Image (cartoon, helix red, strand yellow):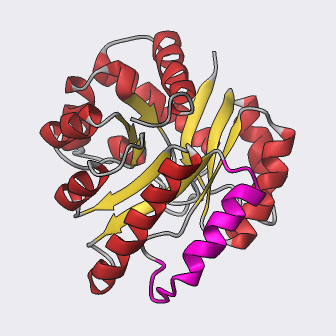
Amino acid sequence: MVLTDAHCHLGSRQFDENRDEIVSRMIENGVEKAILICCSRHDRLASIALRDRYPGFKLACSIHPQDLEDDDPQRLTDLKEALVECRADMIGETGLDYYSHPHTKEAQIRFFEAQLEMAAELGLPVDVHSRKASLDTLNIIKKYPVKGIIHSYSGSLEMAQLFIKQGYYIAFGASVLFPNSKKPAHVIAGMPLDRLLIETDAPYQSPIKGHTHEPADVKAIYEKICEIRGIGMNELADRVEANFDRVFINTTA
């Protein structure tokens, strides 16, 4: 049984002191496949080394929507060069965040569209961050022949179905473990299993106060989703692994 983490920041500085220990623990817990999200040069260099050691790890690079105080177009040129140089498997996380950074909305839209265009040109899937911006996100991705993942989904079942119609997978993290977390459970119960992915967003979104989230924690999310769907762990693991693998096949719409 193979577990997957469809979104983690293993290259983060927060893991610099114990990265090998974190990775060993995730492998021991059966988490053999993961998407390593890199939104800085530091993250990218650390993650490249991990991908070289673990064949199930995929590398995603991008300019994050929360990192656009500097919207110099040269950053996009630099990103494209980095994507080619490091042989990235994916562009991400890119997208829109109107919750924490409404003041950079125009720059977010420009950079999101530019990265979707890049993905189409390079034949790469995308990992999309969308917070309080579902309608704009949907309308933008409709314009580009690209497929990928909607990361840390928090929207409605109806909106999830519209993203799925565009060829996207829907990823859920530790939000399903929070008390009274009804919306994610409702979406997970109603969406097709062949579009479901599971993630941690480690070291972020920890469900336990004071605990640094790590990829090994994804097992608890699997267990909760098994409960929601009424299926066994082996079946869920097999279905989600197949979904994970398909993200990197036929990446254009």
Question: Magenta stretch containing residue 81, yes or no?
Answer: yes
Q: Position of residue 218 (x, y in %)?
A: 54, 38
Q: Position of residue 23 (x, y in %)?
A: 76, 44
Residue 159: name its quadrant: top left
Q: Position of residue 75 (x, y in %)?
A: 58, 79
Which stretch is magenta? 67-88
Quarter holding the N terminus is: top right
Question: Magenta stretch containing residue 113, yes or no?
Answer: no
**Residue 107 in the figure: left or right of residue 69:** left
Residue 252: name its quadrant: top left
Residue 228: name its quadrant: top left
Residue 151 visible? The answer is yes
- What residue sits 36% from the left and 73% below the top? 110
- What residue sits 43% from the left and 75% below the top? 66
Q: Position of residue 115 (x, y in %)?
A: 47, 62
- What residue sits 34% from the left and 33% below the top? 167
Say if 163 sits above or below 204 in the image: above
Residue extending furthest toward the left: 158
| Front position in the image: 238 or 62 | 62
| Front position in the image: 97 or 76 | 76
Say if 92 sits above or below 103 in the image: above
| Front position in the image: 141 or 129 | 141
